[in-house]
Image: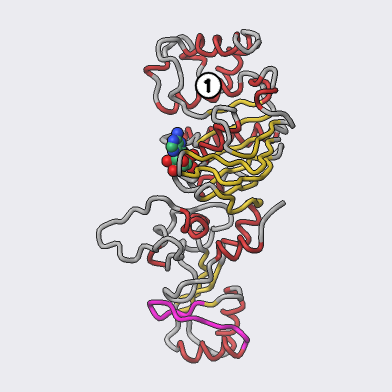
């Protein structure tokens, strides 16, 4: 278990981490999410005692990092894959780590096998690919067989096979009852990996919630209906207590009813349908909405007039491209903006934040 209490870090006038309090529990993968510059790495460095908090503290299994007698047995971390001595072989790099932490040499072979690097054990990491470097970093984290594992952006730059491998490994470690804390700035990646989420923006806690709750509250659906008689369809839906909106292309967008129900209503009133589809907003979009106010740097493409200003939720045109945020619970239809035909939707993130998401 990792417990943060009012954790704060200032660099001169810049507050990188601002009063963070949350607990990372064992048995699940906890995703640590936030846009670039949100303070994830700074937080993780403070967990490991590499940076001193300006205020507040972190405890690992109830102890301060400095109180841990053999830290690698308590917490293993992958912060930056490049922090490896390039001149030593992978085996010797791990052996040095093991010897300085009272870990028997046989464990070096075990972890190399676990990460699939046994074939290059005698090679120098200098020539390793990014993926091999990540695997070596993870081998180092696993060396002390720790109860807690912490990975900072472990899938950055990896190919799909590498991403799949890391995801599976993290889930296995959590199933073994370990605490697994992993940072990312990609909601779509976390959606497939984590069961619990901690979201920060500009150093502040935005959410601490289960992934299931996040999906339930943010993967909002609506039904798109196209018919040659939209006005009559609208009247039928309104008579049922629904409030259809008109999309940019004239299609009706209906919240609060499933597609089969709408299809039955249309049939009962002998209305021809040209389209009846369930649309689900992507989790990536929900995450962008939640963190929109706390993104440090906004990119703008030429002619990017639709990008939301900080604090403004993006309309459908400002959201990610369809299909960019596939995660569990968004199997139907392309990723779309919410209903309303370009009208700003309710600020889901803010609403969700207000409702809280604590355990
Ligand atoms: N040593 C430092 N000195 C001054 N400012 C720093 C230092 N380290 C981090 N910062 C600033 O603190 C803020 C948080 O940085 P941090 O690297 O923790 O964010 P992050 O969420 O990990 O971002 P990313 O996803 O880009 O890695 C940023 O504005 C960064 O510029």
Query: Mainly helix, strand or loop, the magenta region?
Result: loop
Question: What x and y, as percent, mark residue 330?
Answer: 54, 58
Which segment did they paint magenta? 240-253
User: Residue 351 vs residue 273: left or right?
Assistant: right
Examine the rendering and report whether any part of residue 160 can be seen.
no
Q: Residue furthest right?
A: 62
- Ligand 1 under 8 Å from disc 1 Cβ: no
Is 207 located above or below residue 257 in the figure? above
Question: What x and y, as percent, mark residue 123?
Answer: 43, 11
Q: Residue at x 51, y 40 (%)?
A: 10
- The quadrant of the image that shows the N terminus is top right
Q: Secondary structure at mark 1?
A: loop
Q: Which is more toward the observer, 115 or 302? A: 302
Is 332 located above or below residue 138 in the figure? below
Q: Which is more toward the observer, 262 or 358? A: 358
Mark 1, other Cα within 10 Å: few <14 / some 14–19 / many ≥20: some
Ligand 1 placement by image quarter: top left
- The stretch drawn in magenta includes residue 78: no
């Amino acid at each position: 278990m990792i417990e943060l209490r009012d954790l704060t870090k200032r660099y001169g006038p810049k507050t990188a981490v601002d009063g963070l309090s949350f607990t990372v529990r064992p048995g699940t993968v906890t995703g640590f999410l936030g846009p670039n510059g949100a303070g994830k790495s700074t937080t993780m460095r403070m967990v490991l005692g590499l940076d001193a908090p300006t205020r507040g503290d972190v405890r690992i299994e109830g102890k301060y990092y400095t109180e841990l007698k053999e830290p690698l047995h308590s917490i293993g971390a992958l912060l930056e894959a490049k922090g490896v001595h390039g001149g030593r072989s992978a085996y010797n790099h791990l052996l040095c780590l093991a010897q300085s932490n009272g870990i028997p040499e046989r464990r070096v072979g075990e972890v190399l096998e676990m990460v699939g690097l046994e074939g290059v054990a005698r090679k120098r990491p200098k020539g390793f690919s990014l993926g091999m470097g990540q695997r070596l970093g993870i081998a180092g984290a696993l060396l002390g067989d720790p109860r807690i594992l912490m990975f900072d952006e472990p899938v950055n730059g990896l190919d799909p096979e590498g991403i799949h491998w890391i995801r599976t490994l993290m889930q296995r470690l959590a199933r073994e009852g370990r605490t697994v804390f992993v940072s990312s700035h990609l909601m779509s990646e976390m959606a497939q990996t984590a069961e619990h989420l901690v979201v920060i923006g500009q150093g502040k806690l935005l959410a601490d919630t289960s992934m299931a709750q996040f999906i339930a509250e943010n993967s909002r659906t609506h039904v798109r209906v196209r018919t040659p008689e939209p006005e009559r369809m609208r009247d039928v839906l309104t008579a049922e207590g629904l409030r259809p909106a008109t999309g940019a292309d004239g299609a009706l967008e209906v919240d609060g009813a499933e597609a089969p129900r709408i299809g039955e209503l249309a049939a009962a009133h002998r209305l021809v349908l040209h389209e009846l589809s369930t649309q689900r907003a992507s989790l990536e979009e929900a995450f962008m909405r939640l963190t929109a106010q706390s993104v440090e740097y906004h990119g703008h493409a030429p002619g990017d007039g639709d990008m939301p200003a900080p604090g403004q939720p993006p309309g459908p045109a400002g959201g990610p491209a369809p299909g960019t945020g596939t995660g569990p619970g968004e199997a139907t239809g392309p990723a779309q903006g919410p209903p309303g035909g370009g009208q700003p939707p309710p600020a889901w993130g803010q609403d969700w934040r207000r409702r809280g998401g604590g355990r």
